[in-house]
Image (tube, grey):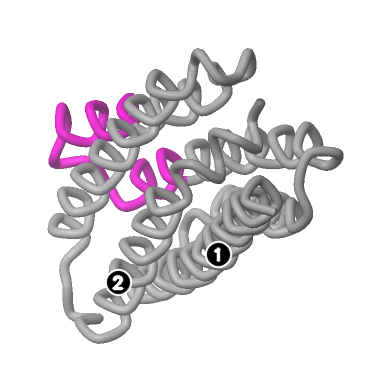
Amino acid sequence: MFANMLSRYWWMTLLRGVLWILFGVTIFVRPDISLASLTLLFGAFALVDGVVNVWHSFSARQDNEKWWVLLLVGLAGIGIGVVTFSNPAVTAVALVFYIAIWAIAVGVLQIVAAMWLRKEIQGEFWLALSGVVSIAFGVLLFARPGAGALAVLWIIGGYAIVFGVTLVALAFRARGFVNSVTGALKA
């Protein structure tokens, strides 16, 4: 049951959301950060996020037959992290394409997961919305790859904050689902 997995590990979704928000705020507070630093920071962040998702998927595989969707999200993050670290001299345009592909893949998988959750929990809207935000961000990056370095940083920062906020909202909805189930069991 996907809802059970999401509700049991709601705190991991909250942690991911908070990390995304902090990442976005850091970009806005430090716009002088170089694209080389951003490349390494993004690579580390995608790698850690991917590992957390892979771990989360394996810990939930007994509860849910669709655990592989989260595994794919995690593997996409790990793959982008590895690709980023294997070529740290990557150009700004290549980094933009790496991020765009990753954002679109994550977005599609989150929308699919939200459709599966439709009948299991309330609040799946937030998961779908985070997927739409990811896809829109990826498409925007594909459409405007030659944007200036500062604009790219601000787009990435804005995306990270919006994506993080939607994950935090989803985490609290999932936590509420746990509380409602626990309360119903005690009654």
Could you tell me which quadrant the C terminus lies in?
bottom right
Instruction: Classify residue 184 as left or right of residue 64.
Output: right
Which of the 4 quarters of the picture holds residue 37?
bottom left
Please tell me which residue lies in front, 129 or 7. 7
What kind of residue is marked 2? Leu
Q: Residues within 10 Å of mark 2 (few under 14, many from 20)?
A: some
What kind of residue is marked 1? Phe
> Which of the numbered marks, if any, corresponds to residue 22?
2
Q: Tell me, yes or no, whether the highlighted magenta stretch contains residue 80.
A: yes
Q: Magenta segment range?
A: 78-99
Please tell me which residue lies in front, 24 or 116. 116
Disc 1 or 2, which lies upstream in sequence? 2
Report the mark closest to the observer, 1 or 2. 1
Res 81 visible = yes
Determine whether the residue tagged by mark 1 lies in a helix, strand or loop: helix
Q: Is residue 173 above or below residue 150?
A: above
Residue at the extreme bottom: 29
Instruction: Classify residue 128 as left or right of residue 14.
Output: right
Please tell me which residue lies in front, 64 or 154. 64
- Read off the residue under disc 1: 172
Q: Is residue 96 above or below residue 157?
A: above
Query: Which percent across, then down, holds residue 65?
Result: 63, 13
Instruction: Classify residue 39 as left or right of residue 73.
Output: left
Determine whether the residue tagged by mark 2 lies in a helix, strand or loop: helix
Instruction: Classify residue 174 as left or right of residue 43.
Output: right
- Residue at image location 60% in from the left, 40% down from the top: 104
Q: Is residue 163 above or below residue 109?
A: below
Query: Which percent across, then down, holds residue 121?
Result: 76, 47
